Image (cartoon, helix red, strand yellow):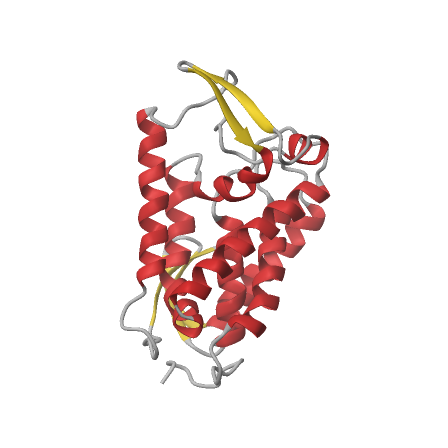
Amino acid sequence: MFIPIHDRNPLKSIPFQYVTVALIAINVLIYLLFLAGIIPEDEHGTATFALIPSELLTQNMFEPRNVMVSAGSLPVPERLTLVTYMFMHGNLIHLTGNMLFLWVFGDNVEDAMGHVRFIMFYVMCGIFAGMVHAWVMPNSEIPLIGASGAVAGVIAAYLILHPRVKIWVLALWRIPIRVTAAWALGFWVLLQLFYAFTATDDNVAWWAHVGGLAAGAVLIMFMRRPGVPLFDKTQGGA
């Protein structure tokens, strides 16, 4: 695997990636609130706002999930967990990995769409990722949390917009190398597809990643600004 560090791809249409930064800040804040116990857990220690496929698909999506917490019963509609799950993270590594990918690649996707459409894009990718995960594993009672499905949509959009841009990554978690987005992100995409069809470990929601990738690849076609090209041939976004 690899860790993205930096890309030299200047913004063209917006002065600053306000939505990307806001999303990162919200995710970090929610994680801190979760650690502090302000965001409640159910009796099994499960995040209240996680997506649970077996409950999402078998219960009425408009019927609230009654979660017992110290202060009483907290009603959470099942349909709401399709959004809330993507802002919850299990540990610091989980949070840091997702936010690092969002920081490196989110700004240029936001630049290609504009602020409002980008937040819509991000949420729709996350929702579709959660739905695909639930469809593939309809009987699963394992809670799904994390922004990786929505971030996968951002990765797919970036790959389609800027495949030739050079990015710095840490290969094997420690070796800094500079490669094109097509190589780095293309390899990441293939890895998600491979594990989705072969992995037996339920701790990683590979199909949520695949769902997010599919949503991002389709939505970028329609949600980018007029005149923004696909498969940009420049190496620095100039």
- Residue 41 drawn at (x, y percent): 45, 23
Q: Say if 153 sits above or below 40 in the image.
A: below
Q: Residue at x 40, y 35 (%)?
A: 91
Q: Residue at x 34, y 45 (%)?
A: 26
Q: Residue at x 44, y 71 (%)?
A: 113
Depth check: 31 or 204 in front?
Answer: 31
Depth check: 157 or 70 in front?
Answer: 70
**In which quarter of the view is residue 52 placed?**
top right
Q: Say if 198 sits above or below 71 in the image.
A: below
- Residue 134 drawn at (x, y percent): 67, 41
Given the current orientation, which residue lies at the most extreme left position? 15
Image side of residue 80 versus residue 10, left or right: right
- Residue 171 drawn at (x, y percent): 43, 59
**In which quarter of the view is residue 38 placed?**
top left
**In which quarter of the view is residue 57 placed?**
top right
Q: Quadrant of the C terminus?
A: bottom left
Depth check: 223 or 89 in front?
Answer: 223
- Residue 115 drawn at (x, y percent): 38, 65
